[in-house]
């Protein structure tokens, strides 16, 4: 693969190398590609969270909710029914 860089891109890479941030143009490119992967994962997770939040909003809108205090009471009651084990 052959890449053609603009003068600005070449200057950017040279500046990073002069600051000893990267040892070669390839290292700069590797970091850029890594950051693209991080961004894509962030966007994927963000979309997933938005879908999950929408499920919750839809449940609230349908009245499928339980009072927080009541939920904790139920959790504590269930927890008390469980047999205790010695550590």
Image (cartoon, grey):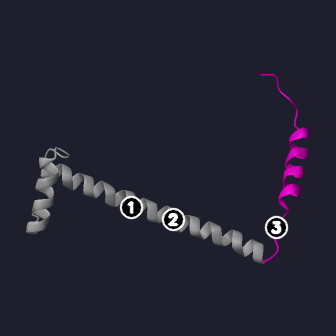
| Pointer 2 or 3: first along the chain | 2
Q: Quadrant of residue 87?
A: top right
Rendered-image quadrant of the N terminus: bottom left
| Magenta highlight on residue 67 | yes
Instruction: Report the side of 22 relative to 42 (left or right).
Output: left
Q: Quadrant of residue 80?
A: top right
| Pointer 2 or 1: first along the chain | 1
Vertically, is 75 above or below 11?
A: above
Instruction: Report which residue position mark 1 lands on.
Output: 39
Place of residue 32 in the rendered image (x, y in percent of width and height, measured from the top left): 26, 57
Determine the secondary structure under disc 2: helix
Q: Which residues are magenta?
A: 62-87
> Which residue ends up furthest to the bottom in the rendered image?
61
Place of residue 54 in the rendered image (x, y in percent of width and height, measured from the top left): 64, 72
* Residue 8 marker: none
Instruction: Report which residue position mark 3 lands on.
Output: 65
Instruction: Report the side of 40 relative to 45 (left or right).
Output: left
**Depth order, front residue of 59/6:** 6
* Residue 46 marker: 2
Instruction: Report the side of 41 relative to 63 (left or right).
Output: left
């Amino acid at each position: 693969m052959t890449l053609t860089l603009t003068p600005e891109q070449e200057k950017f890479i040279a500046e990073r190398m002069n600051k000893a941030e990267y040892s070669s143009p390839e290292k700069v490119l590797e970091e850029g590609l890594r950051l693209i992967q991080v961004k894509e994962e962030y966007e994927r997770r963000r979309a997933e969270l938005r879908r999950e939040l929408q499920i919750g909003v839809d449940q609230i809108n349908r009245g499928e909710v339980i009072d927080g205090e009541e939920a904790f009471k139920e959790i504590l009651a269930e927890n008390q029914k469980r047999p205790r084990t010695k550590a």
